[in-house]
Amino acid sequence: MKIGIIGAGRIGGTLTRRLRKLGHDVWVANAHGPDTLAELAEETGAVAVTVEQAVRGKDLIILTIPEGRVRELPRDLFAGVPADVPVIDTGNYYPRQRDGLIDDIERGTTESRWVARQLGRQVIKVFNNIYAQHLLEHGRPKGSPGRIALPVAGDDPAAKALVMQLVDQLGFDPVDAGGLDDSWRQQPGTPVYTTDHDRDGVRTALARALPERPQEFRSPP
């Protein structure tokens, strides 16, 4: 596939490396410009591009930037991009540690629903509950005992199916976590967050999640 990645931090860099090793064509962008990604491009064979170039002519787009920076993306970023191109959101909301206050999320909007509204696009929530190092190193062949599973939430069945296939290619068992409004079950502070469960464990953890956001993942009073 032709995959555009916006964000080259821990998760974005890891996905660039893993997806290139799987043989996908990858274009990667960040907020600082292609020149700052020369080392990653040389290492992986990915193409360093602008944010706008990362979404044009792609089969799949991955957004992996801090939640608070989503509002800084160009408002017309997805103009002309076909509506059936899936967009993955890997983000998490950390108001105390990084992102500052986002009122809609504080009032109960799921993180990825908020992102979808900012982008004006449907998104699929995945890769937000696993450490980057584990995403890089702990993928296993299908059927391996103890294979880590990852929840995948979204409203578009076709887009979700494609993303779940990609999760499987990367060496993890995809678990359908429901629609985007159910994605609060995999937000920070929930039982599935950074826990490396297998498929049954992920399903159990999602079912045990409570809608109240833990205080450490809310803005200070």
Image: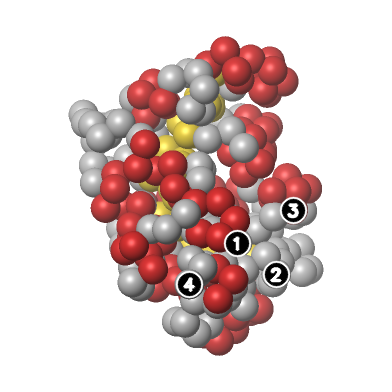
Q: Which residue is mark 2?
A: 195
Please give the label number shown on residue 187. Answer: none
Q: Which residue is mark 4?
A: 221
Q: Earlier in the sequence, mark 2 or mark 3?
A: 3
Seen in the image, is 160 located left or right of residue 166? left
Seen in the image, is 75 located left or right of residue 203? left
Q: Tags 1 and 2 in contact by the CB under 8 Å rule?
A: yes
Disc 1 marks a residue whose amino acid type is: Asn
The Cα–Cα distance between marks 2 and 3, rounded to whole angstroms, is 10 Å
Q: Earlier in the sequence, mark 2 or mark 4?
A: 2
| 77 or 172, nearer to the observer | 77
Name the spot of residue 171 as percent of width and height, x first: 67, 52
Q: Which residue is mark 3?
A: 134
Number of labels in the image equals 4
Q: Earlier in the sequence, mark 4 or mark 3?
A: 3
Q: Which residue is mark 1?
A: 129
Disc 4 marks a residue whose amino acid type is: Pro
The correct choice, above or below, for 81 with respect to 64 in the image is above
The Cα–Cα distance between marks 4 and 1, rounded to whole angstroms, is 26 Å
Q: Quadrant of residue 36?
A: top right
The Cα–Cα distance between marks 4 and 3, rounded to whole angstroms, is 34 Å
Disc 3 marks a residue whose amino acid type is: His
SS class, disc 1: loop
Q: Earlier in the sequence, mark 4 or mark 1?
A: 1
Q: Tags 3 and 1 in contact by the CB under 8 Å rule?
A: no
The Cα–Cα distance between marks 2 and 4, rounded to whole angstroms, is 28 Å
Foreground tag (2 vs 4): 4
SS class, disc 3: helix
